[in-house]
Amino acid sequence: MKKIFITIFLLMLVPVYAGAAGNADNGRKVYDKRCWWCHGEDGAGEGPAAEYLVPPPRDFTSVMFKFKTTPFDEVMPSDDDLFGMVKGKGDDKGGTVHNSIRNWRGMNDSSMPGWDDMLSDEEIWDVIAYIKGLAELEPPELGQLDFSSQVASSEDSIAKGKEIFKDNCTECHGQLGKGDGTKKLKDDAGYRTWPRNFTKAWSFRVNNDPRNIYARASIGIPGTQMPSFADPESKKKLSDEERWHVANYVASLDEPYKKPGNNTVIKAVRVEGDVPETSDNEAWAGAAFTSFYMVPQIIAEERLFTPSINSVSVKAVYNDNDIALLIEWDDRTKSLPGDEKAKEIADGDPLKDAFAVQLPVTLAPAGETEKPYFGMGSASKPVNIWHWIGESTTDPQALHLLEGKGFKDFAPRDAEPSGLKAQGVYDNGTWRVVMKRKLKTGVEQDLQFEEGKFIPISFAAWDGSNFDEGSKHVMTAWYWLLMEPKTGSGVVVWPLAIALLVFGGELLWLRSARKR
C-alpha cells in the first residue's frame, strides 16, 4: 500500500505536459518530414530553404536559443520554452505566440510556422527530444525567470520606463521605439539584424505581454546584440523594478491601427475645400487608416527574399475635383544616397527609398470583379502606376507616372496633364507620402475615378538601405478603394417628410372618428 501512495505522489510531480520526455526516434521521423527543409539534415540551420529566409533558421547544434525564459546566465532553455516555440499560436494550451496577423499561427514576422494544427502535442514533444539530442542539451540547472516582482502597468510606471528607455535603449530602438536606431547590427553568425519596432506589437517574435518584454530585458536575446540588463557585470545593468518599468513602457507603444486586419477597403472620405497635399493637414483627421501586410515579390526575376518592410497603412480623402492618398509605412532607415551616416548603417551606399500605387486603367463593368494581373497588368488590362522616389544628397524627390502592361512592359509618361503630385516626409522611422490626382483627367490612358464604385488598388515599396531595386521589392495583393458617396440632405428630409404626412393623416383620422 505504501508503494502505491509513493507512486501516486511521484506521478503528481510530473509536469503539466506529460509528454515532456518525448521519443527521439519518432521525433527524427517528424523532423525529417517537417523541419529539415529549413533547419537542415543535421540541425545546423542549413536546409535548402535557409538562404531564402529572414531571420535564418535556428542552428540547433549551436546551443543558442534566442527566446527562452531561463535566466541570462543559463544557456539551456526549458522544455516548455521549446514546446511553445514549436506549437506556436498561444490561444491554445502550451503555445506562446499571440497577437499574430490573420491566419498566421507561428512566430511573428518570421518563417517559423506554428505546428499546432499539424502535429499532436505528443509529436511535438517527440521532435523536441530529437532536437535536444542534436546539441546534446542537458536539462537547465537554473529554473525559470522569477516574475513574482511584477510591477503593474500604470501612468507612473510607464513614465518612469520612458526615461529609462531614453537613456538605455534609443541607440538601437530609436527615439519612438520604431527600431530606427543609429547603429548597424549583426548577430554572432554575421547576419544583419534589425531592432524590434515596438509600435507593431503583432511583429514581436513571441508577444508584447509585459512579462515577455521583461524577460527579454532581463535575459537578452542570445546570439544578438540585445544584452541582458540583469547582468551585474554590465555597465547598463538595471534593477528589477527598472526592468518592469521599461517593460510597461514598451508595451504601451503599440499602435493597433498598424496591424493588418480583415478590412480590405480604403474608404475615401469627402471633404470640404481643397484636398491636402501634405501629411500634417487637418483634413486627414476625418479619414481612418486601413493597413495591409506587405510580402516580398518572388514571382518574377529578380526576386526579393530578405524583406525589411512588412506593412503599409493608407487613408484617402476627395472633393469634387481631386483625390489624395496618405500612405504611411515604417522604414528603419531613411535611405539617403551620398550620406555618410546612411552609408554606415546600410553597410554601403544605399539606394533611394521608393513607393508605388497601382490602379487599373478602366473599371470592370457592373457585376464583374475581375482585376488586372497583379504584376503590372497586361496588354488587355493595363494599369496606372504612381511611382514616388525619395531624395539623395544631390537629387530631390521624384514622381513617375507609368502605364503598365506586364512585368517587362511598362512606359513612363508625363504626370502633369493628369495633375498627379506627390510629396514625402520621413520622421523617426516612418515615411508619410501624400499622392494627389484629379478625379477626371481627360487622358485616355488614365483611370477616371467614380464615386461609389469599388476601385482595385495595390501597393509596392522599396527600402534603399536593404538595396531593394527594380523587381526586388515588397508588395500587397489587390485591395479596394471606395469613394463614399455624398450623403446629401435627402437622407434626412424625406424620412422626416413621410413621418409628418403619416402623423398628419392619423390626426385627421382621429378627428374624423371623434365627430362620429
Image: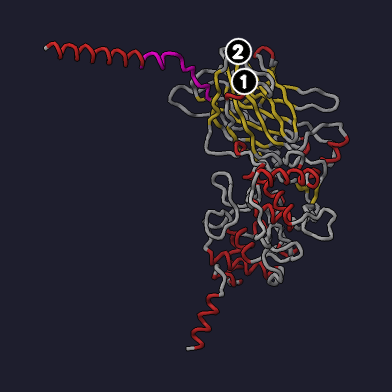
- List x then y, in percent, for residue 94: 56, 60
Q: Earlier in the sequence, mark 1 or mark 2?
A: 2
The residue beneath circle 2 is: 273
| 183 on left or right of 414 | right
State the extent of the magenta-drawn residues as a range.
482-495
- Give 73 or 122, whichever is nearer the viewer: 73
Q: Residue furthest left?
A: 516
- Give 451 or 356, whichever is nearer the viewer: 451
Q: Residue at x 67, y 37 (%)?
A: 474
Q: Is residue 136 visible?
A: no
Q: Residue at x 53, y 77 (%)?
A: 11
Q: Residues within 10 Å of mark 2 (few under 14, many from 20)?
A: few
Is 325 above or below relative to 175? Answer: above
Q: Secondary structure at mark 1?
A: helix
Distance in Å between CA atoms under marks 1 and 2: 9 Å
Protein image colouring: secondary structure
Q: Toward which corner of the image does residue 123 lie, by quadrant?
A: bottom right
Amino acid type indicated by mark 1: Ala
